[in-house]
Structures are given as C-alpha cells and as structure tokens.
Amino acid sequence: MTLALRLAVTIVLYLASRRLYERTRVAVLSPALVCIAAIIALLVLTRTPYPEYQRAGRLIGFWLGPPVVALGVPLALQLGAVRRNAAAIALGLLAGALVGIAVAVGVATLLGATPIVVRSLAPRAATTPIAVAVTARLGGIPALSAVVSIVSGALGGFIGIGILRAVGVQSRLATGLALGAAAHGLGTARAAGEGDVEGASAGMAMGVVGVLTALLAPFVLSLFV
C-alpha cells in the first residue's frame, strides 16, 4: 500500500469503529480497541512491516499534541471541583501510582520473572511514551514495557467503568481519576466518552501518575530487585 492509502485506511477504520460504538455503546467496541485490532489484522494480512506502516502513522501522530493540550480546556472548566478536592485527589493519585508500580513489580517477582522483566513492568500504569522512557532509564526492555502499557490501557478502558460501578463508585470525578490513573490514554478516551468531568479528571490523572511513576519507580524497584 502507498503512504496515502495507509493513511486513508487508518482514518476510515477509525471513523467506522467510532460509528459502530456510537450505535452500540458496548464497551468492548470502544473505537480505540476496535481500530487497534483492525489495523493489526490488516498489517498481518498484508504482511506490512510496522515501521513501514508507521511512516503514515507519524502524519496522524503529529496531530496528537493539540488534542492532548485541549484536555486542559475541560480541566480548566472543572478547576472549582479540583480545588475543593485537592487533598483527596493528590492522595488518591499518589496511592494509585504506588500501587500500580508495586503490584506489577510484586506479582512479577513472586512469579519468578527475571530482573530485566521486572524492571520493564514497573512503569505499567504510565502512558506508553513515559513507560518506554522510564524503562530505558531503569535498564528494562522498552518494547515489552510498551506492550504491557497498551494492554493495561485497553483492559482498563474495557472493564474499568463496570468495575467502578460494581464496587459502588458513582462520583464522576472519582471515575475519571481512576480511569486516567489505571488505564492512562485509552482509559482517558473512555472517560471522555462518559462526560466532561470524567474526561478532564482522567486527563489530569494520566499526566500526574505518569510523572509520579517516573519518580517513584526506581525507589519501589529497590525494594524488590
């Protein structure tokens, strides 16, 4: 496929998956999940190397920056709620970052994973670019960290809302914070579909937990490895 055709196919797949989700509102049919699965299947069927496909993906990735910055708009509109709950938010995100690192590292250690794998899993709760950078600094395997981060986000985006409702969480602010902290990018996408409050708080949580993970991962690792 030519560069233009790959770009067009990617856009069409996303628009189709988004329309499917809007019609069904089934969590497993989230546009991010469906589009990722469809592109993987397409690359396998056409035997297209990912680096070759990524040449078209970079053109789309360039436009990722403005939407991320735009997350600050709904957050600014919710500053009153953030200020009123600042202490609880700070404590919750700190706990979320610590638990995210400790669970990944602890489970991997108990299952007998090698130190390099354990280091690769430490930044699991961070969004993929941060996870890859942190893993490289820790001496892990960035590719493994990227896969784990994406899978974690996909699972969180898929089952996160259901779990939160099952345990009785009704707060829109708490819902967004949980999705952003545990499922980063894909969780934030799911949260944004739930409403402005959820989307704004998820975007904030994703950024803060990413920074906290970068700062705390070396300390938590030192307790296990």
Image (cartoon, rainbow, N blue to C red):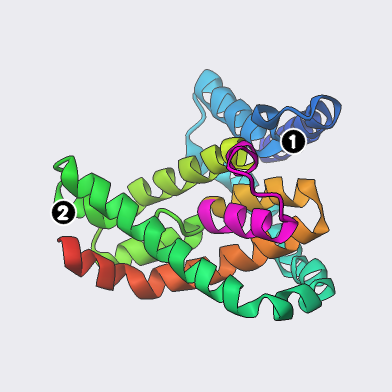
Closer-to-camera residue (211/139): 211
Q: Hey, what amino acid is under mark 1?
A: Tyr
Q: Which residue is mark 1?
A: 14
Give the x, y percent position of residue 218: 27, 71
Q: Quadrant for the N terminus, please.
A: top right
Q: Hey, what amino acid is under mark 2?
A: Pro
The residue drawn where x is 31% and y is 58% is 102
Look at the image and give the residue range highlighted in magenta: 162-182
Which numbered marker is on residue 115?
A: 2
Residue 145 is inside the magenta segment = no
The residue drawn where x is 75% and y is 52% is 192
Most extreme residue toward the front is 168
Name which quarter of the figure residue 38 lies in.
top right
The residue drawn where x is 84% and y is 30% is 19
Closer-to-camera residue (224/50): 224
Magenta: main secondary structure equals: helix
Query: Can the viewer see residue 123 in this picture?
Result: no
Q: Is residue 170 above or below residue 177?
A: above
Give the x, y percent position of residue 106: 24, 52
